[in-house]
Amino acid sequence: MFSRYNVLSGSKLRTIAFCCFIGYQALYLSIGCSAATTSANRNAAPIVYNNTRIFPKSEAAVYSSLISVYQKRGYVVTLLDRDSGFLNGEYYTSSPLPNDDPQTEPISSVSPILVILSFIFIIGFVFLLFESSSSSNNNSTPANKENDDSHHHHEYATQPETTYGYKYVLSSMVRALSDSTCAVELNLTQVTYTNGSPGNSINYKHAGFTNSFFDALQNELYFTLRK
């Protein structure tokens, strides 16, 4: 068992110890900076999620503009009911929409020096592992190499690749508050597909998405009235 691996020399052990020390210092400093940034972001004003917005336009005008925004954003309208004000559309993609709401998961900044130190640790450690692995492979017999290659080839051939897909179902409800004012409510559901089969379904809530959609609807109403 131990014949396939080389015993690390004293110089290599010192190099590994030095890389571990550098990596520990970089990790310690990065955690401290991340904690300080997170504390500062918590004191900032949060982005409020709101899936309803009021528009000073008629229900018919808002509903027509809503259909246009659906189509421009790639959603296929699957259910349309002007009488009830309900609208449903679906959007398929191979990559999920971003769900890192800045209100709940602030992005911390890390100093470039810490990044460089982390790279030094990773590169040095990988180099030592690669050198040790190469030496052990050179000392192995041709028969062992042939058996290992056939074993790995068998593993790769029997493991199917897992594919993921995502369907987003966007439902809207337009409610008239008066003859010239109405409210629009948005609800987005994410369905995850694994190898073509539907799986987990979650209610997608993201302030950036709803604000962007409502802004697009506002712009659509503005340009439609100018035509």
Image: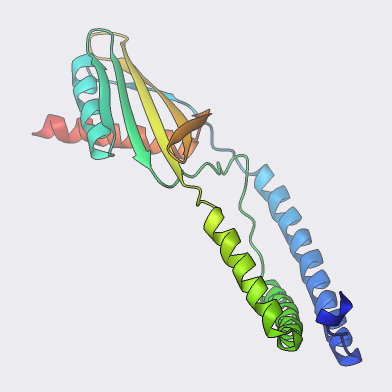
The image shows residue 19, relative to residue 97, as above or below, that is below
In front: 76, or 186?
76
How many numbered discs, if any? 0
The image shows residue 108, relative to residue 8, as above or below, that is above
Where residue 155 sits, quadrant-wise, is bottom right
Instruction: Pick the quarter of the image with the N terminus.
Output: bottom right
Residue at x 11% of width, y 34% of height: 226
Q: Is residue 19 left or right of residue 85?
A: right
Residue at x 19% of width, y 16% of height: 60
In front: 186, or 196?
196
Q: Is residue 43 left or right of residue 205?
A: right
Counting from the top left corner in percent of width and height, residue 156 is at 56, 61
- The answer to whether residue 188 is visible is yes
- The answer to whether residue 112 is visible is no
Instruction: Pick the quarter of the image with the C terminus.
Output: top left
The image shows residue 70, relative to residue 93, as above or below, that is above
Counting from the top left corner in percent of width and height, residue 146 is at 63, 77
Q: Residue furthest right?
A: 10
Q: Is residue 79 left or right of residue 205?
A: left
Counting from the top left corner in percent of width and height, residue 58 is at 22, 16
In front: 137, or 144?
144
Where residue 215 sits, quadrant-wise, is top left
Q: Residue furthest left?
A: 227
Where residue 131 sits, quadrant-wise, is bottom right
Counting from the top left corner in percent of width and height, residue 190 is at 46, 32
In front: 125, or 65?
125
Residue at x 70% of width, y 50% of height: 38
Q: Is residue 102 left or right of residue 116?
A: left
